[in-house]
Image (cartoon, grey):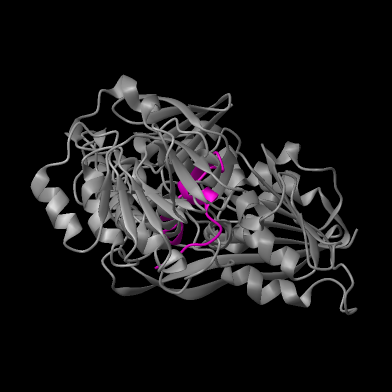
């Protein structure tokens, strides 16, 4: 299965969700692939997180996912296994599925590899800690042990002294501790123990003492240490992205918004900064999401300028329409066709709560009119030749691939990929077609005549057409002519005694030209009722 996205985010923790929220609100098509194993899952609560102090990490993820989903962000379980690509798209393999994306954000975090000392791992996040800003308040004034795994823990011993005056630095894993450092620590009562730690004792998660290699035990209530951070970025190895070495290890090289040496790939959060707390990760994700959206916007304008004015082809095939929709993030405005909204409320049953009837929208595009019809009480189906357009219509409906029930559970908005013949069998109480002008392999009038045959006795056919080009349009907009509604009535074959013509007129509406100036355009409207 192949799927295409604007952005794929690997990792659904604080950084990844923050980026997804920015991108979802920017109307990007976003997929978050997440294994459900955030770095802070071992802790019961987060602290020093403004507005969420004391909230469980899992609750942050739950809220964040719900917020992202409300803006159309999609989620998939699993991990990204590899990334390849060409000049246009990146290709990601995850859980047996191949995804194509214009860009990606890596927010996969790290694993904290703890020293192999019995008793450490099962207390990680509870009484074996790494960040005094996250946990210091909760263990304040207790007996602290600082288990050194690298010279950086010498600074950690100074930091935790702020939360307790009973601190012991266990420095057995270090080659040496400079005498001036020992004196500096001693100046505020921090002891230095040079014998290696071999075990942690107590009923987990509490700690009673640590055992030293010489058999002595030192009583402590909490241990601060630093595991070796192992970034989850091996799936990027084939891209040979630039890396930087630090005292904590080797990490991807990124700029201020998280761009790697491949500008389509950004990396944020602990995967590039193991010292980042939850607020820092949220901020980095927001910067990356906003920056990446700006990058995509610029690329879209560059492509539009390079492409120049596009004329209609002689025949618009199904592939033409697929490329038309797939080449842009969204075509429709999200609002219903004006003629439809003015005329349809007067059709169908007036009984409260009753289904108005079956409706078919021919050439439904991304589904705005079908969704509106369903909201008005119609059992509505849309058909379009573009699979991308139908996929977006289904996503807008917020339901499964076959459609979504309304709040009452009876009226559905469903969508079908294909020509008119792919639509569910008629008859329909309402058949609509709006702006069906592009030259196709079959004549427009023949397609509309076939659509008219699907109208039930007593039902209606509503055809909205362009009755003329806007004043600012060039010759490329005059590709197919603009017949008068009465000419369309004759061409489609809407004659008595089978049809009663209720409307055959032009209506003017206000629009805005590409340069932002006000303009008008005329629509042709046909409303016919089948009477025989």
Q: Residue 175 appears at what percent x and percent y?
A: 20, 31
Residue at horizontal 77 percent and vertical 77 percent from the top? 346
Toward the left, the furthest residue is 180
Quarter containing the C terminus? bottom right
Quarter containing the N terminus? top right
Q: Residue 414 appears at what percent x and percent y?
A: 74, 51
Residue at horizontal 41 percent and vertical 46 percent from the top? 328
Task: Using the image, determine if residue 414 lies above or below residue 500.
Answer: above
Find out whether residue 39 is within the magenta segment: yes
Find out whether residue 502 is within the magenta segment: no
For the residue pair 452 and 155, the one nearer the viewer reads as 155
504 with respect to 70 (left or right): right
196 with respect to 358 (left or right): left
Residue 131 visible? The answer is: yes
Residues in magenta, as a range: 22-48
Q: Residue 354 appears at what percent x and percent y?
A: 90, 72
For the residue pair 366 and 96, the one nearer the viewer reads as 96
Picture quarter containing residue 84? Answer: top left
Residue at horizontal 58 percent and vertical 50 percent from the top? 205
User: How many dots with numbers?
Assistant: 0
For the residue pair 532 and 89, the one nearer the viewer reads as 89
Task: Using the image, determine if residue 44 lies above or below residue 515.
Answer: above
373 with respect to 242 (left or right): right
Toward the top, the furthest residue is 238
Picture quarter containing residue 243? Answer: top left
Q: Residue 133 appears at what percent x and percent y?
A: 35, 63
For the residue pair 167 and 47, the one nearer the viewer reads as 167
273 with respect to 428 (left or right): left
Residue 389 visible? The answer is: no
């Amino acid at each position: 299965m192949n799927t295409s996205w604007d952005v794929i985010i690997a990792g659904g923790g604080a950084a990844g969700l923050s980026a997804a929220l920015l991108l979802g609100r920017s109307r990007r098509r976003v997929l978050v692939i997440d294994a459900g194993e955030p770095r802070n899952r071992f802790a019961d609560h987060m602290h020093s997180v403004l507005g969420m102090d004391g909230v469980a990490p899992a609750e942050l993820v739950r809220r964040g996912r719900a917020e992202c989903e409300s803006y159309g962000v999609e989620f998939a379980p699993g991990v990204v296994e590899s990334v390849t690509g060409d000049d246009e798209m990146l290709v990601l393999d995850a859980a047996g599925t191949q995804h194509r994306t214009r860009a990606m954000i890596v927010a996969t975090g790290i694993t904290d590899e703890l020293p192999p000392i019995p008793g450490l791992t099962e207390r990680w996040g509870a009484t074996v800690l790494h960040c005094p800003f996250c946990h210091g308040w909760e263990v304040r004034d207790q007996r602290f042990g600082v288990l050194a795994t690298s010279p950086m823990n010498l600074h950690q011993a100074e930091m935790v002294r702020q939360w307790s005056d009973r601190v012991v630095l266990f420095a057995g894993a270090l080659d040496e501790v400079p005498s001036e450092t020992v004196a500096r620590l001693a100046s505020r009562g921090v002891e230095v123990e040079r014998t290696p730690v071999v075990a942690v004792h107590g009923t987990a998660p509490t700690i009673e003492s640590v055992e030293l290699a010489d058999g002595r035990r030192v009583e402590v209530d909490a241990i601060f240490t630093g595991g070796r951070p192992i970034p989850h970025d091996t799936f990027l190895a084939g891209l040979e992205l630039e890396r930087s070495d630090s005292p904590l290890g080797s990490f991807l090289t990124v700029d201020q918004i998280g761009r790697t040496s491949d500008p389509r790939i950004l990396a944020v959060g602990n995967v590039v900064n193991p010292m980042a707390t939850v607020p820092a990760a949220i901020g980095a994700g927001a910067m990356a999401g906003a920056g990446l959206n700006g990058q995509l916007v610029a690329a879209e304008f560059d492509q539009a300028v390079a492409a120049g004015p596009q004329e209609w082809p002689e025949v618009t095939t199904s592939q033409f329409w697929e490329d038309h929709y797939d080449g842009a993030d969204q075509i429709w405005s999200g609002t219903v066709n004006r003629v439809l909204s003015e005329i349809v409320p007067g059709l169908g049953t007036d009984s409260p709560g009753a289904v108005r009837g079956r409706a078919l929208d021919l050439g439904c595009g991304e589904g705005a009119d079908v969704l509106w019809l369903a909201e008005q009480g119609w059992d509505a189906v849309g058909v379009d030749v573009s699979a991308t357009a139908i996929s977006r219509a289904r996503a807008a409906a917020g339901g499964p691939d076959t459609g979504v029930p309304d709040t009452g559970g009876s009226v559905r908005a469903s969508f079908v990929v294909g020509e008119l013949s792919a639509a569910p069998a008629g008859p329909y109480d309402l058949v609509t077609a709006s702006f069906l002008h592009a030259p196709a392999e079959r004549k427009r009038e023949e397609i509309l005549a076939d659509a008219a045959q699907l109208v039930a006795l007593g039902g209606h056919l509503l055809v909205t057409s362009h009755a003329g080009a806007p004043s600012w349009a060039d010759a490329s907009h005059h590709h197919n002519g603009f017949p008068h509604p009465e000419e369309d009535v004759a061409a489609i074959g809407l004659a008595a005694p089978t049809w009663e013509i209720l409307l055959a007129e032009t209506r003017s509406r206000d629009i805005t030209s590409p340069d932002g100036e006000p303009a008008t355009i005329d629509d042709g409207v046909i409303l016919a009722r089948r009477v025989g």
